[in-house]
Image (cartoon, grey):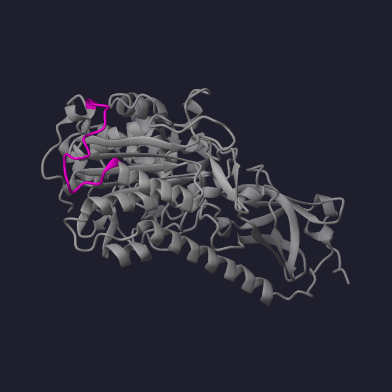
């Protein structure tokens, strides 16, 4: 069990807006040292804009923005600039459920089908046993990111379709045996909130949680933020150049990662967690009992290599919307988040009464580097292990991952049968292919006699197929910002007819939400070829 703060924070301390006196505690880092780390990190990772807030011992000691909201424009980031906090939203979803648990309207170990009768998993026994707690703890037995293609890149999916898709997603491990991060089940959890509360999830999380906490600039989804709001624009690094991009957030994913919030308001959230569920005005949002449920470890986590190496965090677990571990032996609560063009990190050290939040408008590991650096600064007088260069550590780990991915791609290219040809004429591959959980994709032929891939779920997944070897092609997405090209392998029946498509990412660095490998696309339409297969080209 995690031991929480040594004393309950006085909620009224969060009413102040001014920065605390940097000389009040000699062990604490100064705003100047924090800003030096921020400046260095933004340069290291080419970050256009960043917002940081720090709460320590009941005081807001830092809340500022740096850089610009969008490259090429003058608007600067400040402590009220809205960022998409992505999966950091998951703790808000579990807190919404805790409110309903306090009201006696649900229990964490109630079967999901008690609230969503249409909910089904692949195995009937798992369906009957699947609880609300299981929705929140990444132990479903499904593979990593299973079904994320329904949402990412933005598709024309509904929440009802997400619930329906669950029955077709095949497990990779037994139920409750291993950790594998997912998003779809949090969307299902949001629907539980909606059914029990009798209002849309977005309304509930704003009216019963965000606004009572005073986080009135935050919204449950990007679409609910006003068009002229002070909000950051997402960016990507494409061939070492910053490019703006539209958000690929789907509003149906609100419960999994939809919240938009500012650094100032996230400081309030950090204070709420440190105060064990007490709002800034002293009112209790959730009971201590339910707060304890949120932080109770459930699923063991595999440790991140460099984090284990440098912090000694050899045992980690996932609670309800929170990662639970240690940092130099100190109890640690944390969660990261990534959406297209933005990343976020929130870390809370209850024993140190410390909460650090960082978000940036670039798909980058910069928030993790800054959070760990600030926490390290706070622990330098109390921990003999502190004093490490976290910016360099994260940069090196990121570089190694990219290099390993590039070497994997290069090795595959070098070993392919370059002189091989497809088994059939290209017309034979044309048609519509369907996966039960995802839907349809269409293979056509362009005027230049190249095969072309188009998802009917997501317009962004479109591009020509470049022959790789035998009956395997590479989908080169026309939106190169996706950085997620995929192998497209056609399989034939014993009679030599095209039967299905299997896919996987070309690079191991591709975001796990491109879960091509979970697709089993079966051909359903031969109209374009008249139902006949053609002989191979010579």
Residue 450: quadrant of the picture? bottom right
Position of the N terminus by quadrant: bottom left
| Residue 374 seen | yes
- Is 18 included in the stretch rendered in magenta? yes
Q: Nearer the viewer, residue 241 or 150?
A: 241
Which residue occupies 31% across, 43% down?
A: 32
Q: In the image, residue 292 lies at what x, y percent? A: 19, 44
Q: Which residue is drawn at the image coordinates 32% and 24% (left, top)? A: 211
User: Which of the two residues, 35 or 444, is positioned nearer the viewer here?
Assistant: 35
Q: How many marks?
A: 0
Q: Point out the image quarter for the C terminus.
A: bottom right
221 up-or-down from 237: above or below: above
> Residue 300: x, y in percent?
30, 60
| Residue drawn 36% across the image and 43% down it | 35
Query: Start and end of the magenta stretch?
Result: 15-31
345 horizontally vs 341: left or right: left
Judge left or right: residue 284 versus residue 106.
left
**Does residue 428 appear to the left or right of 43 in the view shown?**
right
Instruction: Specify the principal SS of the magenta part.
Output: loop
Who is closer to the viewer here, 299 or 282? 282
Q: Quadrant of residue 312?
A: bottom left
Is residue 172 visible to us here? no
Q: Give the side of residue 196 with respect to residue 363, left or right.
A: left
**Residue at the outermost left position:** 7
Residue 398: image location, x then y, percent: 47, 60
Determine if the magenta segment contains residue 276.
no
Question: In the rendering, at what x and y percent does residue 382 appear?
Answer: 16, 56
| Residue in view at x 30 percent, y 49 percent | 374
Compared with 471, 59 (above or below) is: above
């Amino acid at each position: 069990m995690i031991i929480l703060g040594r004393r309950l924070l006085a909620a009224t301390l969060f009413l102040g807006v001014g920065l605390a006196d940097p000389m009040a505690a000699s062990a604490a880092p100064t705003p100047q040292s924090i800003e030096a780390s921020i400046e260095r990190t933004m340069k290291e990772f080419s970050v256009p804009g960043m917002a940081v807030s720090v709460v320590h011992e009941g005081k807001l000691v830092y809340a500022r923005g740096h850089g610009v909201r969008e490259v090429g424009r003058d608007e600067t980031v400040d402590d009220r600039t809205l960022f998409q906090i992505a999966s950091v939203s998951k703790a808000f979803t579990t807190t919404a459920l805790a409110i309903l648990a306090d009201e006696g309207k649900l229990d964490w170990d109630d079967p999901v089908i008690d609230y969503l009768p249409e909910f089904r998993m692949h195995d009937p026994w798992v369906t009957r046993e699947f609880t609300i707690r299981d929705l929140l703890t990444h132990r479903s037995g499904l593979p990593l990111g299973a079904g994320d293609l329904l949402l990412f890149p933005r598709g024309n999916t509904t929440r009802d379709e997400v619930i329906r898709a669950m029955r077709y997603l095949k497990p990779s491990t037994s139920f409750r045996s291993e950790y594998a991060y997912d998003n779809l089940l949090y969307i299902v959890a949001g629907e539980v909130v909606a059914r029990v509360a009798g209002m849309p999830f977005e309304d509930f999380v704003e009216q019963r949680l965000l606004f009572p906490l005073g986080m009135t600039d935050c919204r449950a989804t990007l679409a609910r933020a006003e068009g002229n709001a002070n909000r950051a624009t997402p960016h990507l690094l494409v061939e070492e150049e910053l490019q703006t991009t539209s958000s690929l957030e789907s509003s149906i994913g609100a419960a999994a990662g939809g919240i938009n919030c500012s650094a100032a308001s996230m400081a309030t959230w950090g204070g709420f967690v440190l105060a064990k569920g007490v709002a800034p005005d002293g009112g209790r949002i959730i009971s201590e009992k339910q707060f304890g449920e949120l932080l109770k470890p459930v699923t063991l986590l595999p440790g991140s290599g460099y984090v284990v190496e440098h912090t000694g965090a050899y045992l980690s677990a996932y609670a309800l919307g929170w990662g639970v571990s240690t940092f130099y032996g100190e109890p640690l609560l944390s969660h990261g988040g990534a959406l297209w063009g933005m990343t976020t990190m929130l870390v809370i050290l209850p024993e140190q009464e410390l909460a650090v939040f960082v978000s940036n408008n670039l798909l980058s590991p910069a928030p993790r580097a800054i959070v760990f650096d600030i926490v390290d600064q706070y622990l330098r007088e109390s921990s003999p292990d502190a004093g490490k260069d976290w910016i360099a550590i994260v940069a090196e780990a990121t570089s190694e991952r990219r290099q390993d991915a590039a070497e994997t791609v290069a090795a595959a290219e070098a070993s392919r049968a370059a002189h091989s040809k497809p088994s059939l004429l290209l017309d034979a591959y044309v048609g519509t292919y369907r996966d039960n959980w995802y839907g349809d994709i269409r293979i056509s032929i362009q005027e230049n006699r190249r095969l072309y891939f188009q998802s009917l779920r997501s317009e962004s997944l479109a591009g020509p197929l470049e022959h790789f070897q035998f009956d395997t092609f590479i989908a080169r997405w026309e939106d190169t910002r996706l950085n997620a090209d995929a192998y497209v392998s056609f399989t034939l029946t014993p009679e030599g007819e095209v039967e299905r498509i299997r896919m996987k990412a070309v690079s191991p660095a591709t975001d796990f939400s491109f879960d091509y490998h979970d697709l089993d696309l079966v051909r359903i339409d031969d109209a374009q070829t008249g139902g006949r297969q053609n002989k191979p080209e010579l």
